[in-house]
Image: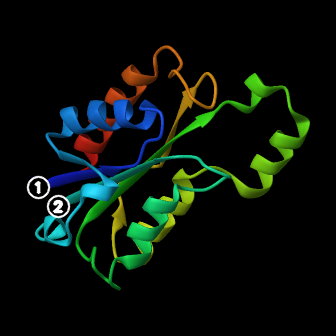
């Protein structure tokens, strides 16, 4: 199986999740800025991950997905994840309201991948950081490994 995991990361948290998932899947793992179009050829599985920035994927992840040609992912199984702050940790009712309205980065990533022809193999996942710069909450790497194993079972 040819698998590719593309991610963006500002403080290293999303990168840690990407590397954990990529290891389980035996995927090539690249930061989005280093991905070349030819790396998408012949893929069986594409996973994309991003930190949640202003309730959406990072600008570079959005740009990458926007540049994918129509049906570029035809026949490719896809999955998406993000890193985020747990709303309960902020104590902010306003932030909680905003998240209910706009959500996190995972769903828009998955929607864009499917729009480009991919087939979503598993529900998206969000991994929690303690603060905007991290670190990851305890147990998140283990959850990422479990999610990757579910992806393996689904493909």
Residue 85: percent from left, percent from top = 64, 32
Q: At 22% from the left edge and 57% from the top edge, which residue is drawn?
A: 45
Q: At 52% from the left edge and 61% from the top edge, which residue is drawn?
A: 59
| Residue identifier under label 2 | 44
Q: At 37% from the left edge and 20% from the top edge, which residue is drawn?
A: 142
Residue 64: percent from left, percent from top = 38, 68
Relative side of 26 to 45, left or right:
left
Q: Secondary structure at mark 1?
A: loop
108 and 52: which is toward the camera: 52
Q: From this viewpoint, which residue is outermost toward the bottom? A: 70
85 and 42: which is toward the camera: 85
Q: Is residue 25 above or below residue 113?
A: above
Q: From this viewpoint, which residue is outermost toward the right? A: 93
Disc 1: CA contacts within 10 A as few (<14), some (14-19) or many (>=20): some
Asked if the residue under mark 2 is in contact with the one under mark 1, i.e. CB atoms within 8 Å, the reply is yes
Q: Is residue 125 above or below residue 44?
A: above
| Residue identifier under label 1 | 2
Q: Secondary structure at mark 2?
A: loop
106 and 129: which is toward the camera: 129
């Amino acid at each position: 199986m040819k698998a590719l995991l593309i991610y963006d990361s500002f403080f290293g948290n999303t990168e840690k999740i990407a590397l954990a998932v990529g290891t389980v899947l035996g995927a090539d793992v690249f930061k989005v800025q280093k991905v070349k179009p030819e790396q998408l050829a012949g893929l069986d599985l594409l996973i994309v991950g991003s930190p949640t920035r202003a309730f959406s994927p990072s600008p570079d992840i959005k740009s990458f997905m926007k540049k994918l040609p129509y049906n570029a992912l035809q026949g490719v199984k896809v999955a998406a994840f993000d890193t985020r702050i747990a709303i309960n940790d902020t104590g902010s009712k306003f932030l909680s309201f905003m998240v209910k309205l706009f959500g996190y980065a995972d769903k828009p990533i998955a929607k864009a991948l499917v729009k480009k022809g991919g087939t979503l193999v598993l529900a998206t996942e969000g991994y929690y950081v303690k603060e905007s710069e991290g670190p990851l909450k305890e147990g998140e790497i283990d959850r990422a490994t479990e999610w990757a194993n579910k992806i393996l079972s689904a493909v």
